[in-house]
Amino acid sequence: MAGNVLVVHGGGPTPVMNASLYGVIEESRKHPETGIVYGALGGMEGIFRERFVDLTALDEEQCRLLLETPGTAIGSSRYPVTEEDYSRTPEIMKKYNIRYLLPNGGNGTMDTCGNIYKACVKAGYKDLNVVGIPKTIDNDLAVTDHTPGYGSAARYIAASVQEVGADVRSLPIHVCVIEALGRNAGWITAASALARKKKDDAPHLIYLPERPFDEEEFLKDVKELYDRLGGVVVVASEGLKKKDGTPVVEPIFRTERAVYYGDVSSYLANLVIRRLGIKARSEKPGLCGRASIAWQSPVDREEAILAGASALKAAVEGHTGVMIGFRRKESDRYEIETVLIPIEQVMMVEKTMPDHYINETGNDVTGEFLDWCRPLIGPELRDFVDFQDGNER
């Protein structure tokens, strides 16, 4: 059915969020039944304020720039949608002849757009097809093998830890604690293990939110490694919790669906200084990991384009109330295919690291995780020259 397209971004940006937008725009050129491709400016709030930009007006050069633009070109938000907002949605969709609504976001965005879909059906506006485009660096969306955004965040943390590891090995006098994003899911933290090229390479310890954090075990592990290596690199999730489920560091701010923790890396570094008398420092890349185009994974970028294009194609074919997902093919080499996932299966459902990806002692990952994650970051990280072990790499 002929009509216009509306793309809306929700939640935190990723290094490839604009690549999905590019995928939608390029796919729209293949379908004469699609008219204008609108972008909602400023996320969900942009829909209800009717702040739309015509993306079909972009020339080819501007479109290509989307592939290397960090953040989101149309803006995002964590706008709390009200019942009044939902009730106005059918009227807005009709006004702009929007037949294809493509929300690009995580589980919160999928929840909101699932409710928009229900509101339109309830109001009798059945000419709207809603297809979600997955997005999150945290990789915590249910059902899909992984999400666009994660591969780039994984590449960034692995490369950064590799570089910090070289620095710490060069002057092995302290412990460096690097804090990774992820709240309740340790996928980004775990990806730091891809920094290793040989035995004793950083990271030396990895702590995930899926396992209770034990301070005494942590200090014991750090002391043993420091006595042997001199310099130690630890990667810890921002969402570390104690055995009783409380955060290692008390939250400094809460919203209805999110918790903002204090600096876990600073806390652990100070713990090492106070209890072990060892020099320690903390690093918190934070937003750098979700904004870096320099470390963008080319695999991630192409899959983000695919997700955007597949979403519009599915909507034009009449699918609605679904999200695009990825499934790995049974093959000797890494290949994926897209699948349609009922949106209710991902609405506010959080996927955490499974047990078989975490080692028994809870301070590292397994080889099975490394095999799963490695293809997502793109080309292997480069080798460094290091004469300290008597060999040039």
Image: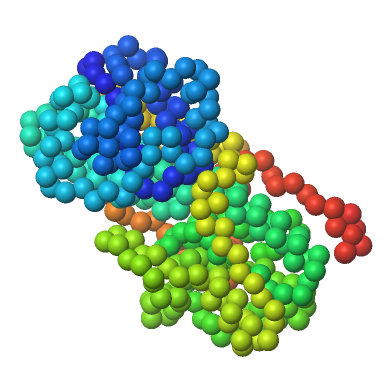
Q: Residue furthest top?
A: 32
> Can I make out residue 182 in this image?
yes
Along the line of sight, the residue nearer the viewer: 90 or 388: 90
Residue 4 is situated, as x and y percent measured from the top left of the image, at 26, 21
* Most foreground residue, 96 or 332: 96
280 relative to 1 in the view: left or right: right
Q: Is residue 100 left or right of residue 228?
A: left
User: For the image shown, how many numbered marks are present on the structure?
Assistant: 0
Residue 361 can be seen in this image: no
Q: Residue furthest right?
A: 390
Specify the quadrant of the image occupied by residue 88: top left
Residue at position x 59%, y 79% in the image: 270
Please name the residue shown 12% across and 30% down the image: 91
Residue at the extreme left? 123
**Is 161 placed left or right of 141 in the picture?**
right
- At 65% across and 55% down in the image, what residue appears? 160
Quarter of the image containing the N terminus?
A: top left
180 to 71, vertically: above or below: below
Q: Tell me where residue 25 sits by quadrant.
A: top left
Residue 231 in picture, x, y percent from top left? 74, 72
In the displayed structure, would residue 153 be above or below residue 333? below
Q: Residue at x 56, y 62 (%)?
A: 284
Quarter assignment of residue 53: top left
- Against 315, is 211 above or below? below
- Left or right of 181, for residue 324: left
Vertical position of residue 211 compared to residue 117: above or below: below
